[in-house]
Image (cartoon, helix red, strand yellow):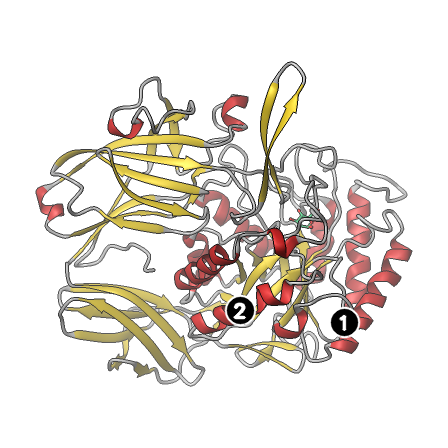
Amino acid sequence: MLYPQMSESRTVVSLDGIWNFKLDNGSGFDEKWPEKKLTDARPMPVPCSYNDVAQDPQIRDHIGWVFYQRDFYITNQMLMSRLMLRFGSVTHTARIYLNGKLLCEHKGGFLPFEVRLNGFARAGSNLLTVAVDNRVDYTTLPVGRLVTETYPKIGEVTSDYPNFDFYNYAGIMRPVQIYATPHDYIEDISIQPSLDGEIHYQIRCSGEGKMLVFAQDADGRIVAWGDDEKLKIDSPILWEPSNPYLYTLTVTFGDDIYRQTFGIRTVEVQNGKFLLNGKPFYFKGFGKHEDSPVHGRGFDNAFNVNDVNLLKWIGANSFRTSHYPYSEEMMMLCDRTGIVVIDEVPAVGLHTGFTATGLLGGTPNGTWAQMQTAEHHQEVIRQMIDRDKNHPCVVMWSMANEPASEEEGAAEYFQPLVELAHDCDLQHRPVTIVQYGGATPQTSKVSDFIDVLCLNRYYGWYTQEARLDLAQVMLEDELEHWTEKYPDKPIIFTEYGADTISGMHDVIPTLFSEEYQEKMLEMYHQVFDHFPTVCGEQVWNFADFATAENIRRVQGNKKGIFTRERKPKKAAFSLKERWENIPDFDYKK
Ligand code: BDP
C-alpha cells in the first residue's frame, strides 16, 4: 500500500487535530450516534491514544467501543478526483462512518487502511465518525483474555486481561489523511534491488495510461530510465547504516506521478552469518515500544526523532518493532538515518500458559487448540509486508513474539505463515519467530524452518535472580545446545534485561539497582562474544514503558536503558562504550 504523498497529480489533506470524543454507553450504535453530532463530547487529540490525556480512570480503563467525530469540508474539485480516506492505524477495531453511513470496518490496530470516499462524500460539509473497539481476546492480535466474573454485591464484572506486557493503549493512533489521485492511477510499487545496480520492480496500475519509470539519485539527477520491469543504475551507492543512501523511483502513469524512495542493499543468511550487502552484520540495539508520556502509543514525530538520535548517541544500529509494526513515518526515518529494523507483526500473547506479567488464566499446553488467530495472522503478515516491503531499513520479518513454540501444533500453525511471508516479499528477506525461554533447542517446534534464531532470555532476572554466576552458566549451556543443533543459523538475542529503577544505587549490585542492570548486561555480552554465530544483541528495552497494572510492575516496565522520559540510566554509558567499539560489519569473522 503506497504512503499518501503530494505530487503534480496528488493532493494530501490532513484530518489530524482535535476531534470530538465520547465513550460508548452500551447503546451508541442503537442510538445511531454516527448519524448526528455527538452530544456531551469532549476534546480528543488525533493522533494520540485516548487513555492518558483525559485524567479520568473511566476513559483510561474503558473496555469496548468509543466514538470519535469531526466534520470537514470537501470542494467540488476534490470530488472530481479519486478520493481516499486513510488511517495510519486505529487500535484495535474500527468502524468508519461518513454522514451516518458505514464505509468500512477494519480489524488490527497497527496497520493502515483506506476507503474510497467518492459516492459517499458531498461537496460542502461532511460528518466523519470513527467507532473504535479496544477489546483483545483469542481472535485478535495481540491476544487478550476477555472474561466476565461475578463479585459479591457488585455482580458481573468484565475484565480484559492483556496477554502481553504493554499497556493496551487505544484510539486513533496515527495520522488521518484524505488524498486525491487521478482516476487512472498507480496502485502499488514493489522494488527489488541488487548490488550491481539492476533494479527490478513490479508496478500495479489501475485504468489506462502510458507508464514511464526512471530513477533519481539523492541529488535528484536522473541516473537510469526503465522499462516495464527493470532499470540499471551504474556504479550504485549502497544503502548501509553508516551511509543510508536513498534513490527515488519515479513512476508516471497517464497523468499520475508517484515517487518511491528505495535503497540498494541485500540481506541474506549464510553459514551462521547475517549478511547485509554480502558482509556479516552485527545487530546492536534494542527492542522498543511506541510509548511516551501523554501520547501513550500515539504517533509523535518529536519522540521518534529524539529516539533515533539517542540510538545514534549510544552507538546502536538497529531495533525490533516489538511487538507490532511501528508507524510508516518511523520506518521512513529509519531508511533515512540508517537504522536497521526487524519488523514484527502484532502477534504477541499466543500462549495460554505463559506471559511476562503473570496475568494468566488459560489452560497451559493447549494454545494451538484454543487460539482462533490463524486467519487474522495471515492478514497482518500480508498487510505488514505490503506496507513495508520497499523500506531498505527492514531486514527481517518477525512472525510473532514468544508464542507457544514448544507446544504441539506450533509447527502446523507457523510453517504456513513463514512460507506466506517468504512468498509475499519480492526481496526475500529472512523470516524469524522470536522465542522465549520455554522454547529450548530440545523443545522448540519452529526452529527448523525459521532463518534466524531470535531468543529472549532472562537468566539473572526471572530465573537465577541476583545470581549472575548461575545465570552465566545457564546461558552458556543453552547456547552450546543451540549452536550444536543449528551451527548454520545466526542467533540474535532480541531481549535480555533487568528492571531498574532510575536513581536506585548499591555498592553490591542488588536487583532493581542501576548497578545490577549494568553488571547483568556485561555478563551477557561476555557470553555472546564467545559464540561466533551470535550476530546481534538487542537489549530489552530501549526505554521504560507503560504496562497494565500488576504486582510485577512498578508503574510500568522498568527495563529501559533510558527512562520513559528518555534520561539515561548508568548502563547507557557502558553500552555506549561497548557499541562504539563494535563495527557494523565483520565483528565476528
Ligand atoms: C518478554 C516479553 C516482553 C516483556 C518482557 C519483560 O517479550 O514483552 O516486556 O518479557 O518481562 O517476555 O520485561
User: Which quadrant of the view contains residue 529?
Assistant: bottom right
Question: Within 8 Å: ligand 1 and the Cβ of disc 2?
Answer: no
Percent of width and height locating residue 317: 58, 62
Q: Position of residue 59 (x, y in %)?
A: 49, 25
In the picture of the structure, the residue carrying the numbered disc 1 is: 482
Toward the viewer: 85 or 34?
34
Query: Which residue corresponds to the image point at 18% horizontal and 69% vertical from the top-left?
Result: 253
* Mark 2 or mark 1: whose residue is earlier in sequence: 2
Query: Assess mark 1: CB under 8 A from ligand 1?
Result: no
- Amino acid type, callout 2: Pro
**Residue 241 shows in this picture:** no
Judge from the rendering whether residue 476 lies leftward or rightward of residue 422; answer left or right. right
Kindly identify the amino acid type of the residue bearing the numbered disc 1.
Answer: Trp
Q: Secondary structure at mark 1?
A: helix
| Secondary structure at numbered mark 2 | helix
| Mark 2 or mark 1, whichever is nearer to me | 2
Mark 2, residue position:
416
Which quadrant of the view contains residue 230?
bottom left
Q: Toward the viewer: 355 or 146?
A: 146
